[in-house]
Image (spheres, rainbow, N blue to C red):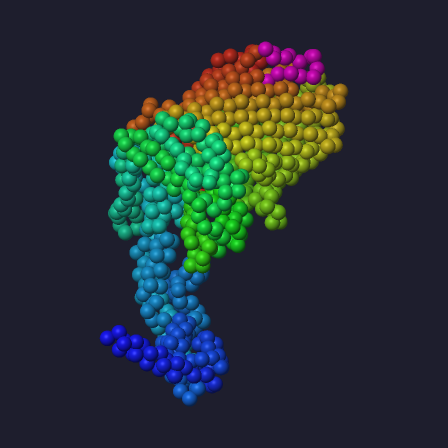
Amino acid sequence: MKLIIKLLLLIFFINSISFAEILKEFKVEGNKRISSKTIILFSKVKINDDINESNLNEIIKELYSTNFFKDVKVSFSNQILKITVKENPVIQSLIFNGIKKKNIISTLKSSVEMKEKNPFLKNKVKSDETQIINILRSNGFYFSKVESEIKKNDNFTVDLIYNVELGKKAHIKKIKFIGDKKFKSRKLYSIIVSEENKFWKFISKNKYLNIERINLDKRLLKNFYLNKGYYQVEVNDAYSSILDKENFVLTFNIDAGEKFFFNNLSIDLPNDFDPKKFRKLEKIFLNLKGEKYNLNKVEKILDEIDKISLLENYEFLDAKILENIYDNKIDLTFNIIETKKLYVNKINILGNNITSEEFIRNQLLVDEGDPFNQLLHNKSINTLKSKGIFGSVTSKVYESEENSKTDIDIIIEEKATGEISAAAGFGTDGSSISLGIKENNFNGKGIVLETNLSLGEDSVRGLLNYSHPNFAYSERALNTSLESTVTDKLTTYGYKSTLNRVSLGTRYEQFDNIFFSPSFSISDESLETTSSASSAYKKQEGSYFDTLFSYGLTYDLRNSPYQPTDGFISRWYQEIPVTSDDSTIINGYTFTNYKELSDDLIISTGIYTRAANSLSNDDVRVSKRLFAPKSRLRGFETGKVGPKDGSDHVGGNYITTLNASSTVPYLFQTMENTDLKIFLDVGNVWGVDYSSSIDDSNKIRSSSGIALEFFTPIGPMSFSYAETITKADTDVTESFRFQLGTTF
């Protein structure tokens, strides 16, 4: 039997050899639009190649793979390769009837698989119809319908027509959070991207019902709970129509479960790794034991592992987290394994409808073609998050079809980036009001435009800011501002001052989380007085021209730049005269720390200090003297604390404030739209250059109060009330303050 099998194999082998012939000529038939030369190129064989049965099958396969042909036949005889084809028609035009908006049509054309000037494939029509429906739903047309129509033309082309019935847009009328949610609905609403349909949300796309966005919201909510210790949280959703098929209620059903805590944390290294290099982690593990579970802190441990690995030239590593859960405790083992070398093949940017892809790519520290570095990739994602213009930024890293290559998807979810703000204050000596508009992502390039107008009893201040994150492709931010202030106190204190200033600066990361922000400014100021003015103002009457250099060093370790709950931010500031009619140097330092003691109980403490000193024998100019900001010394009117010359508050050479505040998590637990905070402010303004002024430098000012914040249909509204604890007889108090702000 074995002998027979061998003979059969030998015969087959001989026949295969005998079939192989040298290709001497091509013959192409049936083509109407595609040239014979092109078809021959598609076949991937050439004259003088050996041709056998296997080659013929490969040729057929290659020709079908082009999608240009619906039928292919191949034969080989007498050294002539004959290729007979039937071509697919080509799409001359893609037409979307029923849609008027050009931007939607453009999105549809770029999203469907079959495109103009490409072959028409009947089997792709249904999948493209589904894609069209999904895109229309993402634009709010949840009840849209699509039917396709094929129009044949005389030149062997077709028009692919999609007849679209848009229907009414599906609005989110109300968003509800039910179940064992642990937190106020207002807090949860700030986490998600979807928005309730309000009249001022006329620009936002997030007010429309969108399945992909809802799934994103679920992930955002889950991550929020994971960072609060609720390791077994479950987030489910349901939506239902109310009244009509235009308005929906979006409901998230949340089962937070019990809170879990870190127990034993350890690291498992490859045998040839030096454990001493990772000893820093032991302290981190020890500090975390007993703390509530926090996903961000787990990711920070992974970042620290990446940093150590990079420093010690341990390349191409991966960390697997092994979990052991019992009772309400979690043991974590970080299992470090070596992986094969990976290089970035392609980076795909997804979900950016407004923000330019160029702006996003400029923030990335790992580019296509670079060795893949998890640390730099994570830092890139965090950089994008810190811009404050995205609802979320996530990524997927996976191996491509090419060996040792990896593809990266960066998924962007945009959010409303416009802000409207208003504030008002009422005290014993008058009132003030300010209005502002800010756009954080102008033209989709991360450009910040801001304008603000402040009106007081005797002053007007206008401010215009422009900030470009990557000016002239320098990878440096460009910040410019134009300020004009007029203070008219001729009838009350006998002086009037006018200040115009323009500044130009930049900001960039010097080291990890350390930012350097130099700037240069030019200002022109004039001071005029009457006979009733104090000696301080009369002495400094005239015009002043200044050119100033300033810089700041910021160390930012907050867990979020917006509404932080953990970490701190520290900043040193200095302003130095370059040319000045009176040389004054200003130094300043600010520090704020955040700590979350329990759910919704957040403590913040901070210090604010400034010093203004003359580099000559001249007095520090009145306009450069220091005053206590309202946010740092509440209960006192701005500019009405500290040294006083006659009837004028002239400011001081020094200021220091200490601030503490805390949320009150349980007092308004049943009132979904209300938050309460308590605060304590302590500080002083003191020091002048001349002896005629009243200087009560030994008098410490202090105040305490409460702040109520309401979530209204037009945005968050806050009311604060402060009572002074200690003050000087010359101080002017301001007990009540109101603030309103929203986004669009």
Q: Is residue 686 magenta?
A: yes
Q: Residue furthest bottom?
A: 78
Residue 657 figure quarter: top right
Residue occupying image coordinates x 68% and y 26%: 585
Q: How many callouts does the rendering have?
A: 0
Query: Looking at the image, is 710 positioned above or below residue 375?
Result: above
Residue 517 seen in the figure: yes
Q: Position of residue 566 (x, y in %)?
A: 44, 30
Q: Position of residue 556 (x, y in %)?
A: 52, 32
- For the residue pair 302 and 523, the one nearer the viewer reads as 302
- For the residue pair 475 and 267, the one nearer the viewer reads as 267
Residue occupying image coordinates x 61% and y 36%: 517
Question: Left or right of 125: which side holds 272?
Answer: right
Placement of the C terminus among the 4 image quadrants: top left
Residue 523 seen in the figure: no
Magenta segment:
685-698
Residue occupying image coordinates x 32% and y 58%: 144
Query: Looking at the image, is 610 positioned above or below residue 171?
Result: above
- For the residue pair 451 and 384, the one nearer the viewer reads as 384
Q: Position of residue 576 (x, y in %)?
A: 69, 29
